């Protein structure tokens, strides 16, 4: 059994006690699941022990995120383990306790000004509102990518006491606004390339979640097609249904292949990591249309209700594909990036990215 | 997901990247010298024996085969890089394509020592070409229903009667690996009683009649066998095991980059147009097509890596072919939604020509090598549904 298998089994065992719930404004996340994961050290996987994390590699963190995504777990683990945590560590900022949820936001409308609060360099005063912040109101800290007069700044703000807007995505996951006017935060200047790589990391985190959820939706649908009988036979014995399930399998396999490759690109610090992440995000987003549509078609009316579990993942799929940068935005980034070296450079670029 | 569909990620291969650079340099020089012009779907339509021989001289055919048969003992990952470079450039690779891709591996797997020694070095040299003798006028997807018969005569030779169709480039090839019914049909086991014969296409009694495809090109043929006497030692593999052997062959036939790159030259022309006249919607389209292409490359690379591990991933291969050939056709529609172009073979605009070629070849992408409906049935089996 590999380390990842062990991690996955541990997360699965914990998840068994926390079935997915319908999220509402009153219950925007699964606090009980979070504290159980934190107690098991799973909210620090992939983050260095020297910074207060639990250690382990990127692939271990990806395994945790995948397992939780497949279980529709309402906790900010993807943000903490794959985006905000590594970004804070890389920027040499002090990682907050991994027992408290840390999220990530891209907020180009928020401006950071060097602070003169007497705490020395590396302190910034923020102004502006970050909108559509994942887990706003739930996360204690946010690592927010802002602009400043001297370039992009990654600011780490304690937002525990701030009021958060109540907006949510299609699955009820909090995506509210944070008014950051006057908030003083530690922060670090990034190069534009580092800022873009960070946006790409966020997109890749969503692609990883999408891939895991797509695989799970396929598995549920295959299982349902084997159990549900009509005309005296399981649905899965009908050729029309088999064609749909095979089409879903093709989409899921494609997403897994390109997402794994993008994670590998991140791991080896490829210079093409932005394009690799863009490809994973765009491919995963494209699969959502097919897989969610056919999953609902095969499940019939019960899948269209909150009485069946399918919606926990399909509603997330429909949201995640346009989060961390929309499908359209990343498609353009990928198209433009592949043409950056000129009219005949497309093929060399395609064979280099992943 | 069912394990039979899931393959491990492909490791990056430095050797593959090295040979890729060599092939890229060769192709640039050939293009500059006017040795070939880029076309869509050249693994069907681009027959050029001189070009095939050049590839043979450089060691890019029979790459994975043992040296004693003229091969080069390189990895499937290296072969993958070579084939994908050739396809992306729209190079004329049709003459040797089938022989290098599946007939050679079939001979390696099932052939006698004499068959291997007499044929494989010629394939690797780019001098000996094969066609697939599977489909018949009344047997397409239902391959087990073929009626071409082979009967042993008193001398131990096979007497073959029947007809094969859609045999690409039979008029320019040397051998057909021909699936025949070698014993009467058994209603209780449809797959029994089939055998494969290595048929020399110059034998008396063989008529090769052209069948033109939509663009007027001559690639398809009907091959009619009338009392053709095939020497007894030209049985491939085991008598009666033809079905099993054909299935193994299909794992090679269905998984390669030609199952998603047939229309890549159209994408390349689209990219050139985009650089000349940038447009945000078209840029997004290029991004979306590229994301699909990059995923397909990873899927196909996983299969190449599985072949290197000695596996025979026929179900994942069926899945790649379904997803890949769907992509080949979608390329046309996605591009024409965002670019003003009227497809024409006679246009001075290379994008319009590539569009025309891609469109008129499009119905074939999701038919050849097993229809996508058949492939999805195989995938459904992999999902445990049948």
Image (cartoon, helix red, strand yellow):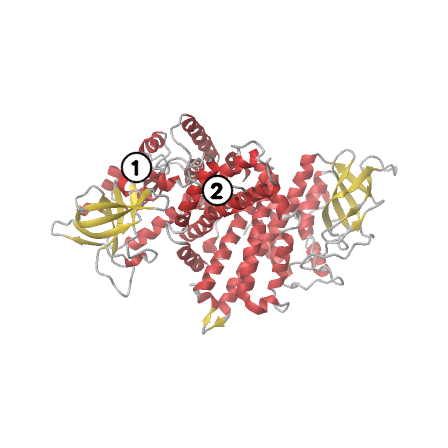
Which quadrant holds the C terminus of chain A?
top right
Q: Quarter of the image holding residue A157?
A: top right
Which numbered dot is residue A194?
Answer: none
Up-down relation of residue A93 to residue A284 (above or below): above
Residue to which mark 2 is pinned: B342
Q: Is disc 2 in contact with disc 1, using a CB cutoff of under 8 Å?
A: no
Q: Residue furthest left?
A: B154
* Residue positioned 67% across, 39% down in the render: A196
Label count reads 2
Residue A319 in picture, x, y percent from top left: 65, 55
Question: In the shown orientation, is residue B143 left or right of residue B233?
Answer: right
Question: In the shown orientation, is residue A118 left or right of residue A247?
Answer: right
Q: Are marks 2 and 1 on the same chain?
A: yes
Residue A256 at least partly seen? yes
Which of the two residues, B61 or A58, is positioned nearer the viewer here? B61
Residue to which mark 1 is pinned: B123
Element type where label 2 sits in the image:
loop
Frontmost of labels 2 and 1 is 2
Mark 2, chain letter?
Answer: B
């Amino acid at each position: 059994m590999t380390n990842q298998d062990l991690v996955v089994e541990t997360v699965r065992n914990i998840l068994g006690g926390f079935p997915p719930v319908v999220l509402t404004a009153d219950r925007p996340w699964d606090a009980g699941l979070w504290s159980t994961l934190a107690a098991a050290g799973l909210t620090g996987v992939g983050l260095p022990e020297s910074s207060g994390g639990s250690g382990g590699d990127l692939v271990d963190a990806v395994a945790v995120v995948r397992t939780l995504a497949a279980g529709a777990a309402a906790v900010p683990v993807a943000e903490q383990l794959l985006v905000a945590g590594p970004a804070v560590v890389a920027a040499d900022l002090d990682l907050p306790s991994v027992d408290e949820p840390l999220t990530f936001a891209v907020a180009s409308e928020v401006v950071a000004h060097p602070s003169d609060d007497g705490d020395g360099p590396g302190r910034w005063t923020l102004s502006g509102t970050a909108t559509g912040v994942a887990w706003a109101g739930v996360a204690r800290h946010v690592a927010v990518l802002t602009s400043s007069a001297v370039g992009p700044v990654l600011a780490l703000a304690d937002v525990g006491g701030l009021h958060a807007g109540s907006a949510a995505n299609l699955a009820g996951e909090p995506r509210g606004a944070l008014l950051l006017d006057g908030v003083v935060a530690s922060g670090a200047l990034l190069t534009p390339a580092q800022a873009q790589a960070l946006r790409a990391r966020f997109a890749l985190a969503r692609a990883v979640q999408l891939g895991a959820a797509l695989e799970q939706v396929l598995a549920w649908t295959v299982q349902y097609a084997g159990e549900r009988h009509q005309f005296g036979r399981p649905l899965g014995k009908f050729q029309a249904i088999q064609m749909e399930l095979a089409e879903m399998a093709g989409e899921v396999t494609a997403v897994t292949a390109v997402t794994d490759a993008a994670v590998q690109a991140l791991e080896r610090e490829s210079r093409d990591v932005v394009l690799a992440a863009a490809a994973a995000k765009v491919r995963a987003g494209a699969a959502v249309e097919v897989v969610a549509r056919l999953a609902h078609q095969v499940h019939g009316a019960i899948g269209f209700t909150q009485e069946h579990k399918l919606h926990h993942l399909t509603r997330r799929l429909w949201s995640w594909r346009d989060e961390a940068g929309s499908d359209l935005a990343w498609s353009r980034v990928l198209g433009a990036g592949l043409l950056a070296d000129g009219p005949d450079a497309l093929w060399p670029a395609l064979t280099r990215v992943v | 997901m069912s394990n039979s569909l899931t393959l491990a990620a492909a490791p990056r291969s430095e050797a593959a990247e090295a040979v890729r650079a060599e092939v890229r340099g060769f192709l640039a020089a050939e293009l500059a010298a006017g040795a070939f012009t880029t076309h869509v779907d050249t693994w069907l339509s681009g027959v050029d024996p001189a070009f095939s021989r050049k590839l043979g001289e450089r060691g890019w055919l029979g790459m994975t085969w043992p040296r004693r048969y003229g091969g080069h003992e390189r990895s499937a990952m290296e072969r993958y890089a070579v084939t994908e470079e050739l396809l992306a450039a729209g190079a004329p690779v049709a003459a040797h394509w089938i022989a290098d891709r599946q007939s050679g591996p079939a001979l390696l797997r099932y052939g006698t020592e004499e068959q291997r020694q007499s044929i494989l070095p010629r394939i690797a040299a780019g001098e000996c070409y094969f066609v697939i003798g599977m489909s018949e006028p009344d047997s397409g997807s239902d391959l087990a229903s073929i009626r071409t018969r082979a009967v042993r005569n008193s001398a131990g030779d096979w007497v073959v009667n029947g007809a094969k169709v859609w045999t690409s480039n039979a008029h320019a090839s040397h051998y057909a690996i021909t699936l025949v019914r070698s014993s009467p049909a058994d209603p209780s086991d449809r797959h029994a009683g089939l055998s494969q014969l290595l048929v020399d296409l110059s034998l008396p009694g063989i008529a090769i009649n052209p069948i033109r495809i939509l663009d007027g090109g001559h690639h398809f043929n009907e091959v009619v066998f009338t009392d053709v006497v095939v020497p007894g030692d030209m049985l491939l593999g085991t008598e009666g095991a033809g079905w099993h052997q054909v299935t193994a062959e299909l794992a090679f036939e269905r998984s390669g980059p030609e199952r998603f790159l047939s229309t890549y030259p159209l994408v390349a022309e689209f990219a050139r147009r985009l650089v000349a006249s940038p447009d945000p919607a078209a840029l997004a389209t290029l991004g979306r097509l590229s994301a699909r292409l990059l995923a397909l490359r990873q899927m196909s690379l996983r299969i190449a890596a599985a072949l290197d591990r000695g596996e025979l991933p026929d179900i994942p291969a069926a899945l790649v072919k379904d997803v890949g050939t769907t992509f080949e056709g979608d390329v046309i529609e996605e591009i024409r939604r965002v670019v003003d172009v009227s497809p024409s073979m006679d246009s001075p605009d290379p994008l319009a020509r590539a569009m025309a070629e891609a469109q008129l070849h499009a119905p074939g992408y999701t038919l050849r090598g097993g229809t996508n409906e058949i492939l999805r049935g195989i995938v459904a089996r992999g999902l445990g549904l049948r």
